[in-house]
Image (cartoon, rainbow, N blue to C red):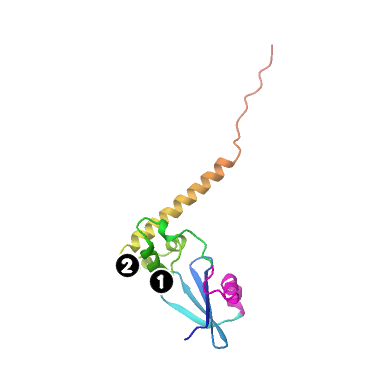
C-alpha cells in the first residue's frame, strides 16, 4: 500500500495508531508498541475518537508528531545507533521501552532485555524522586507542647 501522508503518536498505554492516506481513502494502522503485528482499517469515527492526538497530527500534515518522553540514550548501554535501532522497531522513549512485556523485550535482540530492565528501574527511580519531592513540599505538622502555666 502506497501511503501519501503518515502521522504517528503514542496514545495512553501500549497502543499506537498511524493514520495515512492511500489515494482518497484514509486508513489507520493500529499496533502495540514493540510488536511487529498490526491491524489496518479504513478510518471510522471511533478511531478518531480513540486516537485524537494521532488524528490531529495526521490532519496537520505532520510526517511524525513531536515525541514526548525521556530519550532512549539516557539508558546506560543505549547509544545513538542502538536508539535508532529501537526507533525502527517502534520504540521512541524510555517510557515506551519500560512498558514492554518481557517477550517483546527479548525480541529486541542482544541487549534488549537488559535495556528493558534498566528502563523499568529508571522509571521507578524517577517516580520515587517525584513522590519524595511532593512529600518534602508538604508542610510538616508538629505537635506543640502544652503551654506551661506561668508562676
Farthest residue toward the top? 151
Marks 2 and 1 sit apart, C-alpha to C-alpha, by 13 Å
Look at the picture and state if 92 lies above or below 125.
below
Please tell me the numbered disc located at residue 79.
none
Q: Residue at x 39, y 67 (%)?
A: 84
Image x and y of residue 61, in percent? 57, 76
SS label for mark 2? loop
Please provide the residue range marked out in magenta.
45-65
Looking at the magenta stretch, what is its main secondary structure?
A: helix
Relative vertical location of residue 128 with respect to residue 8 in this rendering, above or below? above
- 70 sits to left or right of 111: right
Q: Answer above or below: position of 23 versus 37.
A: below
- Of residues 20 and 38, the one nearer the viewer is 20
Q: Label 1: few (<14), some or many (≥20) within 10 Å?
A: few
Q: Residues within 10 Å of mark 2 (few under 14, many from 20)?
A: few
Q: Which residue is mark 1?
A: 88
Residue 141 located left or right of residue 107: right
Q: Nearer the viewer, residue 112 or 103?
A: 112
Q: Check residue 40 for magenta coloring.
A: no
Say what secondary structure mark 1 lies in.
helix
Q: Which residue is mark 2?
A: 109
Q: How far across and down, in percent of the image, does residue 131 sit?
A: 52, 47
Q: State the quadrant of the C terminus.
A: top right
Assess whether mark 1 and mark 2 are in contact (beta carbons under 8 angstroms): no
Q: Which callout, 2 or 1, points at the residue further toward the start of the chain? A: 1
Amino acid at each position: 500500500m502506497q501511503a501519501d501522508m503518515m502521522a504517528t503518536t503514542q496514545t495512553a498505554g501500549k497502543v499506537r495508531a498511524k493514520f495515512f492516506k492511500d489515494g482518497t481513502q484514509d486508513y489507520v494502522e493500529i499496533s502495540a508498541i514493540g510488536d511487529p503485528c498490526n491491524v489496518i482499517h479504513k478510518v471510522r469515527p471511533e478511531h478518531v475518537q480513540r486516537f485524537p492526538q494521532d488524528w490531529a497530527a495526521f490532519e496537520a500534515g505532520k510526517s511524525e508528531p513531536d515525541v514526548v518522553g525521556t530519550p532512549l540514550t539516557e539508558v546506560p548501554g543505549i547509544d545513538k545507533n542502538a536508539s535508532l535501532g529501537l526507533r525502527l522497531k517502534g520504540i521512541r522513549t524510555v517510557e515506551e521501552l519500560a512498558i514492554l512485556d518481557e517477550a517483546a523485550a527479548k525480541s529486541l535482540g542482544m541487549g534488549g532485555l537488559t535495556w528493558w530492565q534498566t528502563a523499568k528501574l529508571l522509571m521507578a527511580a524517577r517516580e520515587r524522586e517525584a513522590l519524595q519531592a511532593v512529600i518534602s513540599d508538604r508542610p510538616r505538622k508538629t505537635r506543640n507542647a502544652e503551654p506551661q502555666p506561668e508562676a
